Amino acid sequence: MKKLRDYEIGIAKLSNKKHSYEFEMDDSFFALFEQEIILGGKLLAKVELDKNESLLTLHFDIKGHVRLTCDRSLEEFDQPVDVEETLRIKYGPENMELDEDLWQITPETQTLNVAQHLYDYIGLSLPMKKLHPRFVEEQDEEDERDILIYSSRKDGDHEGDDNDGDDDDNVDPRWDALKNLN
């Protein structure tokens, strides 16, 4: 059973150079988060940490698959995941998020837990509409068939004609009958 501390990197004693880490994520990783979207999965995250005196740069490379529930059939299926993200962390007076890709930590910070970042990057890579792969193929075919082309032109009208509706030759005779009601 994985714990959040399994995803900690001790940064206090690291020398100023590049360091590489690998984190395996399985069903127990996703159980750490209170959520119902990702049912489980099997992923490998390679994290390269580049440390210098004023900045930590973490490059995340996450590959594998997660198990989701199809929005249409409610069947479970495996969704491939391939994510590359970069997070920069600078030192400052307090711990806070400055931007989605820039965080600030205090110089006294001893460890950096990357579990939430891993989870967020995986979650953001998922499609909004979760469809089983067999429905994705059907959806693509439906999208090609269901293209609606709307045209207000009648047969005989052509592009480039300056027809403002003033041409009485093409008026439906039913409209003429309505004009006589006045």
Image (cartoon, grey):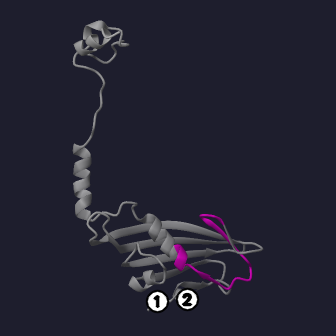
Residue in the image at 50% along x and 75% along y: 118
| Boundaries of the magenta span | 98-117
Disc sitting over residue 2 in the figure:
1
- Locate residue 141, reporting x and y percent: 22, 50
- Locate residue 17, reporting x and y percent: 62, 77
User: Dividing the image into 4 quarters, which one contains the C terminus?
Assistant: top left
Around disc 2, counting alpha carbons within 10 Å, would you say few (fewer than 14), some (14 to 19), or many (20 or more)? Answer: few
Front-lying residue, 170 or 77: 170
Look at the image and tell me whether residue 24 can be seen. Answer: no
Residue 151 horizontal side relative to residue 18, left or right: left
> Label 1, label 2: how many angstroms apart (C-alpha)?
8 Å
Front-lying residue, 155 or 60: 155
Residue in the image at 74% along x and 83% along y: 108
Residue at numbered disc 2 = 5
Say whether marks 1 and 2 touch (CB < 8 Å).
Answer: no
Amino acid type shown at disc 1: Lys
Look at the image and tell me whether residue 52 can be seen. Answer: yes
Residue 28 horizontal side relative to residue 57, left or right: left
Front-lying residue, 14 or 3: 3
**Residue 79 to residue 5: above or below:** above
- Locate residue 74, reporting x and y percent: 28, 69
